[in-house]
């Protein structure tokens, strides 16, 4: 699959994940008001699990190795998860606390800011091209 097609699939999954994350953030913030950064962390984790399943079966389905799903999930959390968690929390702190941008708008900016790095990590480390046996 060419890079543009994979990038398109990645962005479709990302758009769905963005809906999951923003919905979860809004719901958590409404049902259990507290510090927005804790709500952000919970919403990110839900989204990471959602996105991993879709990327495994859709974006990088051709690089799926059933024997390594656990390994791929760990790699996804260590790469995309860390970028998303750290990037979102830093940007949310700056955008919400310092710039006074509303919560969901700030989270949208943070998500989009992390997406390019997440695509590169997903393509090169989480779901690398498999060596074919000779």
Image (cartoon, helix red, strand yellow):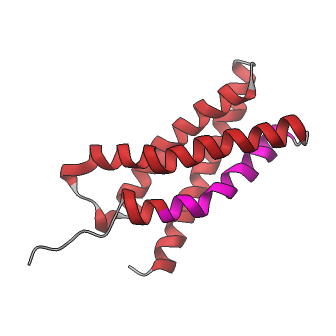
Q: Position of residue 51 (x, y in %)?
A: 48, 50
Q: Position of residue 49 (x, y in %)?
A: 45, 41
Q: Nearer the viewer, residue 104 or 127?
A: 127
In this picture, is 92 found above or below 37? below
Name the residue rendered at 47%, 50% in the picture.
79
Residue sticking out furthest to the left: 134
Q: Position of residue 54 (x, y in %)?
A: 43, 54
In this picture, is 80 found above or below 123? above
Q: Is residue 127 left or right of residue 92?
A: left
Any part of residue 22 in sight? no
Quarter of the image with the N terminus in it = bottom left
In this picture, is 93 found above or below 52? above
Q: Is residue 13 left or right of residue 61?
A: right
Q: Nearer the viewer, residue 28 or 73?
A: 73
Q: Is residue 64 left or right of residue 38?
A: left
Any part of residue 57 in sight? yes
Q: Residue 80 in magenta?
A: no
Give the main secondary structure of the magenta stretch.
helix
Name the residue rendered at 50%, 65% in the picture.
120
In this picture, is 72 found above or below 59? above
Q: Is residue 84 left or right of residue 102?
A: left
Q: Residue 109 in magenta?
A: yes
Residue range corresponding to the magenta coloring: 102-120
Name the residue rendered at 27%, 48% in the picture.
69
Name the residue rendered at 33%, 50% in the picture.
72
Quarter of the image with the C terminus in it = bottom left
Residue 98 picture quarter: top right
Q: Nearer the viewer, residue 132 or 28?
A: 132
Q: Position of residue 46 (x, y in %)?
A: 52, 36
């Amino acid at each position: 699959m060419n890079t543009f097609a994979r990038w398109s699939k990645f962005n479709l999954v990302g758009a769905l994940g963005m809906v999951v994350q923003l919905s979860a953030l809004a719901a958590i913030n409404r049902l259990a008001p507290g510090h927005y950064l804790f709500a952000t962390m919970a919403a990110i984790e839900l989204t990471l699990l959602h996105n991993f399943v879709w990327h495994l079966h859709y974006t990088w389905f051709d690089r799926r190795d059933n024997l390594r799903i656990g390994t791929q999930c760990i790699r996804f959390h260590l790469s995309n998860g860390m970028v998303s968690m750290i990037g979102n929390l830093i940007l949310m702190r700056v955008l919400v606390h310092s710039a006074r941008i509303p919560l969901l708008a700030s989270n949208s900016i943070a998500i989009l800011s992390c997406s390019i790095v997440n695509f590169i990590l997903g393509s090169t480390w989480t779901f690398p091209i498999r060596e074919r046996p000779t």
